Amino acid sequence: MSAVVLALPDGDVLGRRVSDLARIQYGEVASRRFPDGETYLRVATACAQQHVVLVCTLDRPDEKILPLVFLADAARDLGAASVGLVAPYLAYMRQDRRFQPGEAVTSRTVAGLLARYVDWLVTMDPHLHRYHSLGELYGVPNRIVHAAPALAGWIAAHVDRPVVVGPDEESAQWVQDVADRAHAPCVVMRKTRHGDRDVEVSAPDVRAYHTHTPVVVDDIVSSARTMVETVKQLAGAGLRAPVCLGVHALFSTGAEQALRQAGAAQIVTTNSVLHATNRIDIVPMLVSGIHDVMNEGRSGGQ
């Protein structure tokens, strides 16, 4: 059976990149909003007996999830042999338990919704927190691809005498992996979070690295408060202006400007979420994950 890539209109760039590298036909999807805000959607490419690959990174998830469900359901109704989802950034992972009485555990809700409409899932470095695996949350075959090799390759190629800096103890193992792959030393900051935009960061003794270029690495850059405070601490310790490296470039309003004002020499992200700071292409790794999970499904594996 053949396959086709479908993407919502705002995911066209990423969808076409996946299509090109995977050598899978790119299908046409038309979508617009009715005056009352409802979504109109039409799949203009035949899906019957096709393995449909939906490409949708889930930044701004409340705008995207319902149209994505419509697209998945339409593909299946049009006779698709299977429907899979490639979501480089997977949203709604932070609320993984009830911290206060009455809170909605939204990670479970979103996972349950999406898993009803797709047969498999490929994503990059999801923020699992208290889940031991993605399979605990999403009851479909899945592949997690990791950005560490791509980040390390970029550091090795572009940064003079790097020292890789982790923003908090939670990131230590992941950041150490990036540093080891880049053949660079690694230090980890200590972070105390007082609120969504109130973060306190303290640095270990970094005086030994005054001739190195700090590379601050984090998986998600949203408010960027953690990175901002880390950059300030490194500047206060007399180190060179740091490079800030992120996997998922969410960047809330003013976040990028705040990083630059804090003294970041360069801001670099992957294209898991499209942004002007994208310099690292992670689509080849996503395509490898797609082939793995699709081949597993065809061979009857779990």
Image (tube, rainbow, N blue to C red):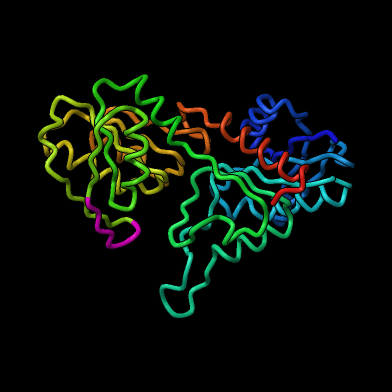
What secondary structure do most residues of the magenta stretch adopt?
Answer: strand
| Along the viewing direction, whichever of 270 and 137 lies nearer the viewer | 137
Q: Give the residues in magenta.
A: 190-196
Q: In this view, does 232 lie to the left or right of 131?
A: left
Q: Where is residue 289 in the image (x, y as percent from the top left)?
A: 62, 38
| Along the viewing direction, whichever of 98 and 290 lies nearer the viewer | 290
Which quadrant is home to the N terminus? top right
Residue at horizontal 27 percent and vertical 39 percent from the top: 165
Q: Is residue 239 left or right of residue 85?
A: left
Q: Is residue 269 left or right of residue 16?
A: left
Q: Where 94 sits versus 56, above or below?
A: below
User: For residue 200, which quarter of the picture?
Assistant: bottom left
Q: Where is residue 57 in the image (x, y as percent from the top left)?
A: 59, 43
User: For residue 155, which quarter of the picture?
Assistant: top left
Q: Where is residue 140 in the image (x, y as percent from the top left)?
A: 67, 55
Q: Position of residue 176 (x, y in %)?
A: 32, 40
Name of the residue lying farthest toward the bottom = 101
Residue 83: within the magenta?
no
User: For residue 175, which quarter of the picture?
Assistant: top left
